[in-house]
Amino acid sequence: MRWLLHALKTVATWLLALLVLFEEWGWEPLARLLGQLAKLPLIGWLEQRVARLPSYAAVAVFFVPAILLLPIKLLALWIIGRGHALLGVAVIVIAKVAGTAVVARLFMLTKPALMRLAWFERWYTRWAVWKAVLLERVRASMAWRAARSVKASVKKRLRSWRRVFDSTGGQ
C-alpha cells in the first residue's frame, strides 16, 4: 500500500510539474503578446484602470478569467461526451492558453497592489520558493536531461538540414 501512495505522489508531482512548466514557459511571452492589445485605445484605457485598482479589487479581478472560462471548459467536456474528444481537448487547450495569457497580464498589471497585502505577499513568496524547488528537481531529473539532449540533437539536425537546403538554393 505504501508503494502505491508513493507512486501516486510521484505521478501527481510530475503532473503538477508539467503544469508549472507550462505556466512558466507561457507566462511572460503570453502576457507580452496580450500586452500588444494595449495599443488599442479601449484595451489601453482598461489596462490603466486595472493597474490602478486597490488591493482587494485586484484580487477580485483574478476571478474574472475563471468565471469566464468555466462555461467554455464545460462546453469542452460536453463536446468530449458527444464523442468529439479531439475537438473537446483542443477547446480545453485553447482555453488554458488564453486563460494563462489573461491571468499573466492581469498579474503584471496588479502585482504592485497585490504585494501590498501582507497575506498575499507571504503566500506569493512561499509559492515562488516552492516553484523554484520543484523546477530545480525537474531540471535535475534524468527525464529532463534526456529531453534536453534530444531537443539539442533535433535542433542540430534541423540546422544541418537547413544549411543543406539553403546551399542548394531550395531545390
Image (tube, rainbow, N blue to C red):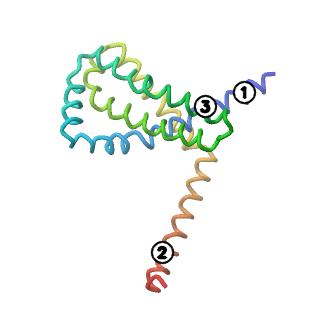
Q: Where's residue 138, x and y in %?
A: 56, 40
Q: Quadrant of residue 101?
A: top left
Residue 131 as seen in the image, left or right of residue 34 = right
The residue type indicated by label 3 comes to Leu
Report the mark closest to the observer, 3 or 2.
3
Report the mark closest to the observer, 1 or 3.
3
Q: Cα distance, mark 1 to mark 3?
A: 30 Å
Q: Relative to 149, does residue 159 appear above or below in the rendering?
A: below
**Which badge, 2 or 1, comes first in the chain's sequence?**
1
Q: Residue furthest front?
A: 82
Q: Which mark is residue 127?
A: none
Q: Which mark is residue 162?
A: 2
Residue on which disc 1 sits: 6
Q: Where's residue 96, x and y in %?
A: 49, 36
Report the mark closest to the observer, 2 or 1.
2
Seen at 29% across and 16% down, the residue is 57
* Label 1 SS: helix
* Label 3 SS: helix
Residue 75 as seen in the image, left or right of residue 53 = right
**Which badge, 3 or 2, comes first in the chain's sequence?**
3
**Label 1 with label 3: CB-CB less than 8 Å:** no
Q: Quadrant of residue 62?
A: top left
The residue type indicated by label 2 comes to Arg
Residue on which disc 3 sits: 77
**Label 2 with label 1: CB-CB less than 8 Å:** no
Q: Quadrant of residue 113?
A: top left
Seen at 31% across and 43% down, the residue is 32
